[in-house]
Every structure is written in C-alpha cells, then in structure tokens.
Amino acid sequence: MFVNADIVTINERQPFAEAVAVRSGRILAVGDVAAVLGAAGPGARLFDLNGHTLVPGFIDGHGQFTQVAGELDWVDLAPPPAGGISSIEELVAALRRRLGRLAVQHKYVLGVGYDDSMLEEGRHPTREDLDRVSTDLPVWVVHASRHMAVGNSVALDQAGIAASTPDPEGGAIVRRCGSREPTGLLRESAWAHVRLTLFPTIPEHHHPDLVRRTGEHYARLGITTAQDGATDVAGMQMLAMAAEDGSLPIDVIAYPLYQLESRLRAAAAPYRRASVGGVRVGGLKLVLDGSPQGKTAWLTEPYRVPLAGEPASYTGISLHSNDEVQRIVGDCFARGVQLLVHANGDAAAEQMIEAVARAERRHGRGDRRPVMVHAQLVREDQLERMRALGIVPSFCSSHCYYWGDWHVASTLGPARAQRLNPARSARRQGMRFSLHNDAPVVPPDMLFLIWAAVTRLSRSGAVIGPAQRLTPAEALRAVTLDAAYQHYEDERKGSLEVGKLADMAVLSANPLRVAPEAIKEIAVLATLKEGVPIHVGAPARLPESLGIGLAE
C-alpha cells in the first residue's frame, strides 16, 4: 500500500487520491488512506512515498523498441542535447575512435543520429568524408530521421550502388551536381533496400542482452509499455527470444511492417491474441512518406527551401500509389487488423484519410482505431474528417524542440511551422490522441516529451505555435490513458483504477503542479510493473523509506 504520496490517477471520476493498494499485480483500492487501508486489510505493508508523486506508468505512443536495441552499440552521432556531435570533423573522429576499438571479427563501422541541420558545415557527410574513416571496411552513418544514410566508397560498392544504378521508386541515390556520381547519401527506399537486405545483422546470442538493456533504459524513464512500430524479421526474432527467456522488464507491443507480414506470420502468431512474456502483436505498420526534417515528408505545398537539385515545386516523397494504399487499408479492415500508418505530411495524411473512408464505406463502421503516426502537418479540415472516421493521431511533440527552428527557417516557413503537431486542434475536435518521441529518432524521455507538448519551445528558445500548446494534464493523459486507448489496452492500463495493472512511476515532483518549464527536470525515482519494482533510482535521490521498501 502506497501512502503519503501526491497521486495523479488520470481517472476523471477520481483524479487525485491519498493512497493506492496493490495485490497480485493489480490495483486493489484507490482513495483516501482510511478507505484504502480498510480494503487492503490490517496486514498490508505500507510504503511511505514521502510526498513524492505517483502516476500511471508511461506508455510509448510510437517508437521502434527493437531498433533502439539494435543501435545500442553503434557510434552515437546525435547533436546536443541528445549527443555531442556538432561537425563533420567530430563525426569522423568519433567513427575513427570506434574503428580503433573494433575487434578483428567486425567487418563494418556503424554510426547513427547525425543531423545535417545541426552540423557546422550545414550539409550531409559524403562518401569522401567517410573514406577518411576507412578505405578497407564499409562505413554507414544513419541520419537522425532514420529515413536516409550515407555510406563510404566500400559500403556503396558492396551495395552495388554506382553512377549507372537507377533510382528506386520512392527513393533517391543522391548524386553530384551535373553528374550521376553518387555522393554516398541514400534517401527513403534506396536506403530501406540496403537496410533490409544488405545491412549486417546482429548475432542471435546478443539479442537477450540488447533487449534487457533497452527495457531497463525505458524503465528508468518511467515507461512500462513500449511500442515496436516497424517490426522486421530480426526485430520479431529478438522479441520472441526475450519473451521466451523472460528478459523483458516492460511490455512491448509490436506492429510488423505490412510488407513483411507473410514472412513474419508464423513467428508473430503466438503473440497476436494476448501478451506472452511481455510481448504482444497489436497489428501492422504502413509507411506512406518520409520525414519533414529530412525534407522527404509528402506535403501539399512545396518546401520553403527544396532539397538540393530539386525544383521549387518539390513537395517530398510519396512511397505508395493511392490504389496500393487503398488495397492495404481495405485488407486490414476486412481482417480486423489494426493499422498504424506513418504519415508526416498533409498529402500523406490525405492519402490515409481517403483510404480509411473508402474502406469504411465498403466494410462498415467498427471500433478499428487506425492510428496516424506522427500527423505532424495534418490540417484542420483533415482533423475533422479523422475524428469522424475514428482515426487516432499520435503526435511527436518533441520535434518542436529538436527541429522547430529548422522547420521555420528551411522546411516549412513560419506560418506552416506554427501548426506542427497540432495537438490543441485535435483536443478542440474532441479527439483522443497519444504523444511519442519516435525513439530512436530522439531519446524516449517521456517527461521531456510532456514538457515539449506544454511549452513548444525550440532549441533557440522560440515558441513554435503557442496556440497548439497542451496543458500538463492533457499531455500526461496522452502518454498514459489515451496511449493505452490507442493500443486497445485502456481497460487494463493507463490510469490508477481498481482492477487495472499496477504499472506506476514515482516522480520527484508533480508535472501538474510545477512551472511548465520545470517539467523536463522532474526525475523518475522508481518504476513498477504490476507492482514489482523494475527501476529504483540512486539512493541519494530517494526517500529512505521508499528505497528500503522497494528493495525488500
């Protein structure tokens, strides 16, 4: 039984409480101390939280859990504050340091998270830059968006990419101005082909350790349920091994890529009906466009500054025809499969909305909860139609901080950037929505995400779209109860209510009571999964009674 706590339940009928009792992994009672003690009985163990805050465990609205795991041991090339790389020279130096530590058996050098918009040179690395790392081993560096990557000369040769190689549909092999010679940069489907078919795979014996470490990292951030929002063959194998050996401290809901469903059918089958070992397959994932920060999201109006070599009318990349998207959505509706659709730009959003409308006309209404992942540039008229169709948006509000200035200056311009991730507009429409960081694109820090949705501050300190700010209560609900609703788990997760799983986080302060600017400074002191501690912070940051109680 947890007492002396500032308890935020996310239950509209009982928003705050004095105590919570837990039995057999579920919440037994919530309310005032006397009532909860009466329900728990005279033998209940008391845990004094010393006035700290108890909230439901955070639920990841969208991310790529197995991709985070797979990248754990890559070279971190992210700029501050997520990393420390601010120039191509620093990028090359970091890769060289890894090269010097590589064991003999390694045959490649991998880096991830570089951001051309934040590099001093203001450009992507080139094959020549990466040739300075090695001319013997392939070197790949993946963009922060994960929608593009750069290879050195050896890597491009191994991938069969040369001046004569045609651009694939829905992607580009970026070439030198006035020449067909590749620069090393591959966008969208050109990179996806390399990633899915030629990229080095992680040996199976490393999978349990990577999943355990990733789960522990999420638990430290107060996350009790994560999403694997683009599960591939290796990712499904990784999750299945974790489910079998019990190495997952949190729950993970997987959404395999639609294009891989036939290859994953047998492996995913045990996890479709219910969670097994913390793993559940929730549906399928479809990707319609790229990323706005990489200028590959599919827009209705042109980018403010087009990609190099593209005309002023450039509006990004569409990955599928309308007919193909309508076929896929219709297939999922017919089979009762929940569909997550990656749509950043408003043109991609339109493609999804029209496909859902057609599928509903054919198959009738139902509680299908199709999710528009990102929905960063969805328009007001589109939100209204999404509400009518039951489409659930999941907004990556942390983009306002990481790329807000870039969107104002280069991708969208000041006017369109103000509507980036229009969560307030969705709230006015009466829509339920979740928030997400899209890890590993940015770290899966949920309190930072809440802070970003509430303040909408950019790196420079500018407010990107003040009219789209959420209240702290709305943002907290979007990473708990409404994220659970998105995943069809709101009957057992997302709020502190009797009968629900005792998935909880202990915070150093209440995000509803501190100044909005201070929300990102709140620490996660402990995380409990079904009443069992899966993370306990440093003793110096914990009240003594909590540290002793959770350690017992």
Image (cartoon, rainbow, N blue to C red):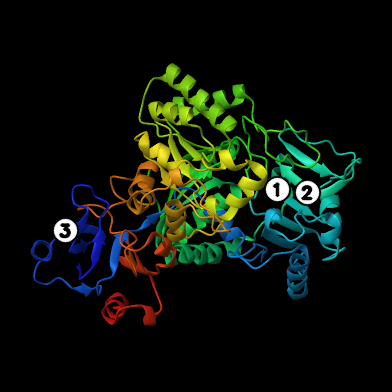
| Rendered location of residue 155, percent (x, y) | 81, 54
Considering depth in this image, is 379 or 179 the residue closer to the camera?
379
**Sequence order check, earlier mark of 3 and 2:** 3
Q: Amino acid at mark 2?
A: Leu
Are the residues tagged 1 and 2 within 8 Å (C-beta)? yes
Q: Amino acid at mark 1?
A: Met
Outermost residue toward the top in this view: 362
Q: Residues within 10 Å of mark 1 (few under 14, many from 20)?
A: many
Checking the image for residue 185, the label placed there is 2
Residue 164 placement, left or right of 42: right
- The residue lying at 55 percent from left, 23 percent from top is 326
Q: Amino acid at mark 3?
A: Ala
Residue 186 placement, left or right of 63: right
Are the residues tagged 3 and 2 within 8 Å (C-beta)? no
Q: Secondary structure at mark 2?
A: strand
Are the residues tagged 1 and 3 within 8 Å (C-beta)? no
**Sequence order check, earlier mark of 1 and 3:** 3
Considering depth in this image, is 277 or 345 the residue closer to the camera?
345
Q: Is residue 271 visible?
A: no
Residue 341 placement, left or right of 476: right
Quadrant occupied by the C terminus: bottom left
Q: Residues within 10 Å of mark 3 (few under 14, many from 20)?
A: many
Q: Secondary structure at mark 3?
A: strand
Q: Secondary structure at mark 1?
A: strand
| Distance Cα–Cα, label 3 vs label 2 | 56 Å
Which residue bears the numbered disc 1?
A: 148
Checking the image for residue 29, the label placed there is 3
Question: What number of labels is visible?
Answer: 3
Q: Is residue 153 visible?
A: yes
- The residue lying at 28 percent from left, 76 percent from top is 546
| Rendered location of residue 7, percent (x, y) | 24, 62
Residue 276 placement, left or right of 160: left
